[in-house]
Image (cartoon, grey):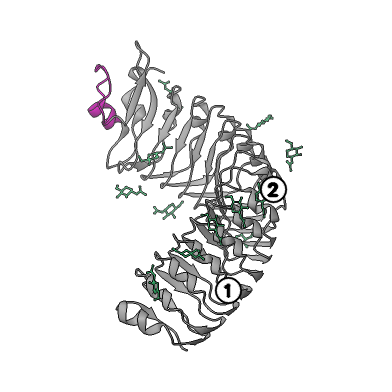
Amino acid sequence: MLLASLPISLLFWPSKAISLSTILTTYWPITGPQPPQFATGLVSSGKRHHRVVALNLPAMGIGGTIPPHIGNLSFLSYFNITNNTFQGHLPGELARLHLLNVVDFNFNNFSGGVPTWFGNLPKLQYLCLASNSFTGLVPPSIGNISTLESLDLRSNFLEGGVPEEIGYLTKLKWLQMGFNNLSGSIPPTIYNISSLQWIEFRHNMLSGSLPEDLCVFLPKLEFLRLSVNEFDGQIPTTLGECRELQFLSLSYNKFSGFIPKGIGNLTLLQILYLGVNDFTGEIPREIGNCTTLSHVELTANNLSGEIPREIGNCTMLSYIALGGNNLSGEIPREIGNCTMLSYVALNINNLSGEIPREIGNCTTLSYVDLSGNNLSEYGLEGLVSTKGDVLIMASC
Ligand SMILES: *[C@@H]1O[C@H](CO)[C@@H](O)[C@H](O)[C@H]1NC(C)=O
Ligand SMILES: *[C@@H]1O[C@H](CO)[C@@H](O)[C@H](O)[C@H]1NC(C)=O
Ligand SMILES: *[C@@H]1O[C@H](CO)[C@@H](O)[C@H](O)[C@H]1NC(C)=O
Ligand SMILES: *[C@@H]1O[C@H](CO)[C@@H](O)[C@H](O)[C@H]1NC(C)=O
Ligand SMILES: *[C@@H]1O[C@H](CO)[C@@H](O)[C@H](O)[C@H]1NC(C)=O
Ligand SMILES: *[C@@H]1O[C@H](CO)[C@@H](O)[C@H](O)[C@H]1NC(C)=O
Ligand SMILES: *[C@@H]1O[C@H](CO)[C@@H](O)[C@H](O)[C@H]1NC(C)=O
Ligand SMILES: *[C@@H]1O[C@H](CO)[C@@H](O)[C@H](O)[C@H]1NC(C)=O
Ligand SMILES: *[C@@H]1O[C@H](CO)[C@@H](O)[C@H](O)[C@H]1NC(C)=O
Ligand SMILES: *[C@@H]1O[C@H](CO)[C@@H](O)[C@H](O)[C@H]1NC(C)=O
Ligand SMILES: *[C@@H]1O[C@H](CO)[C@@H](O)[C@H](O)[C@H]1NC(C)=O
Ligand SMILES: *[C@@H]1O[C@H](CO)[C@@H](O)[C@H](O)[C@H]1NC(C)=O
């Protein structure tokens, strides 16, 4: 479609702040050679004809509904209107944009169902409808977009199940559906997408358990975030095969069983959030292999045994929360090796013995809670005298 042939009125965007026609006439004189650099906004292609191939209008203060006439921009490939105030339903005319490669509608207020016609866009690689007001089901037709690499439907009002058709997207790398009201279990087909790097379903009502061979089929997984759902069952013992894993969050679910020793194979792991579940057994000493760990949150489980001294190997550790378990024995003095620690909560356990002086080696501590244990005060003075602002809650 020749942009020049489009009557400007057809391109009117009903917004008081700025309209597309203003942008077109002000910033992209059709007679000019190239759009100016603002122009990020609009990009043309073709030597003889100006064709709109990109609408890149993030955070422009524009809004209103999307005019159906956008469906005339048949060369459009990149469509980014994040962080504006667009609302209403997405017009079906957009289904005509067969060259669309990127759709980024993040941070608007679109409503209605997620259109099924996205399934007809044969070149779509990136689809982000996050942080809008979409309702209803995730359309199974999304499973038709065989080119799709990133699907982000976070923070809407979607409900129902995760369609198994999503598992047909063999190129998918990023899958994010957190902060909706999805229920049922994650279909097994999803765990078959060997290209997956990110899986994020936090804050839904999903249930079911993780397949035992999870990490055999998802060797590229870097990020798994399933917190605040109703998942149960155990962490797959194949966990150690997910060697790229950097972020593991299963907090606020009904998971049980042991933390697998295979965790020692996760040498890139930075974040481990397993709090508020029903995990039992000991914290595996293999955790000492995870030298890039920065956050460990195992609060409110049924973990027992001692805090492994190998934790002293995790010198990047800044946050450790082990409160509300059944941990016993002494606090390992090796914790003094973790000199970047700022938050330590070991409260409500059965820890005994002396508080190790070495904890005073952690010069950036800002919060320490050792209350609800049987610790004696030795070591505390050092901590108090050197760190004025440390909050001590050690009811020894
Ligand atoms: C959205 O745009 C506003 C300015 O219009 C900016 O201050 C804000 O940081 C942006 N938010 C995001 C998430 O990009
Ligand atoms: C653009 O699209 C609208 C609505 O889809 C249609 O009525 C109109 O004829 C189209 N205009 C041009 C110039 O193609
Ligand atoms: C859309 O624009 C925003 C703001 O410039 C940018 O952060 C985001 O990465 C863009 N989305 C895509 C898919 O390129
Ligand atoms: C978003 O749209 C819904 C209706 O779909 C409306 O109730 C709500 O107030 C809107 N939110 C904002 C921030 O405009
Ligand atoms: C999805 O693809 C199937 C065939 O592969 C086709 O029958 C169906 O109509 C498509 N659905 C959509 C919504 O594109
Ligand atoms: C979420 O879905 C359940 C049914 O699956 C329903 O009972 C509940 O009201 C929904 N919650 C919200 C906030 O929509
Ligand atoms: C996973 O993929 C294999 C081979 O590609 C196939 O045989 C199997 O049926 C798939 N499993 C699921 C649950 O989709
Ligand atoms: C660690 O990885 C190696 C090599 O992939 C594997 O043989 C071993 O079983 C893994 N260990 C655990 C405990 O998963
Ligand atoms: C520690 O990681 C190395 C690979 O980085 C692996 O060979 C070794 O088996 C791991 N040890 C444990 C106890 O997991
Ligand atoms: C400490 O980490 C190194 C790798 O940096 C590893 O070789 C060693 O086995 C670890 N020690 C313990 C006790 O986990
Ligand atoms: C603690 O650090 C010291 C020296 O920095 C090192 O020799 C020791 O092995 C570390 N302890 C543990 C448990 O990693
Ligand atoms: C750690 O603390 C102990 C006891 O307070 C002290 O003797 C030692 O020098 C400290 N080590 C480092 C590396 O600061």
Residue 228 vs 327, above or below: the answer is: above
Tell me the distance, in whole angstroms, between the alpha carbons under discs 1 and 2: 29 Å
Residue 103 placement (x, y as % from top left): 46, 35
The amino acid sitting under disc 1 is Ala
> In the rendered view, does 19 fall on the left or right side of 343?
left
Question: Which quadrant, please, contains the N terminus?
Answer: top left
Residue at image point 35% right, 12% down: 47
Q: Of the numbered discs in the image, which one, if any, rests on residue 300?
A: 1
Asked whether residue 362 appears in the rendered view, the answer is: yes
The reply to whether discs 1 and 2 touch (Cβ–Cβ < 8 Å) is no
Q: What secondary structure characterizes most of the magenta part?
A: loop
Asked whether residue 203 appears in the rendered view, the answer is: no
Tell me which corner region of the image, top left, top right, bottom left or bottom right, holds residue 217: top right
Query: Over which residues does the magenta segment extend?
Result: 21-38
The amino acid sitting under disc 2 is Pro
Residue 374 vs 140, above or below: the answer is: below
Label 2 CB less than 8 angstroms from ligand 7: yes
Image quarter for ligand 3 equals top left
Of residues 277 and 228, which is closer to you in this image? 277
Choose the circle earlier in sequence order: 1 or 2: 2
Residue that label 2 marks: 187
Circle 2 — which element?
Answer: loop
The mark lying in front, picked from 1 and 2, is 1
Tell me which corner region of the image, top left, top right, bottom left or bottom right, holds residue 363: bottom left
> In the rendered view, does 106 fall on the left or right side of 236?
left
Residue at image point 71% right, 47% down: 188
Circle 1 — which element?
Answer: loop
Residue at image point 66% right, 37% down: 168
Q: Residues within 10 Å of mark 1 (few under 14, many from 20)?
A: many
Residue 330 placement (x, y as % from top left): 54, 79
Furthest toward the top, the residue is 48
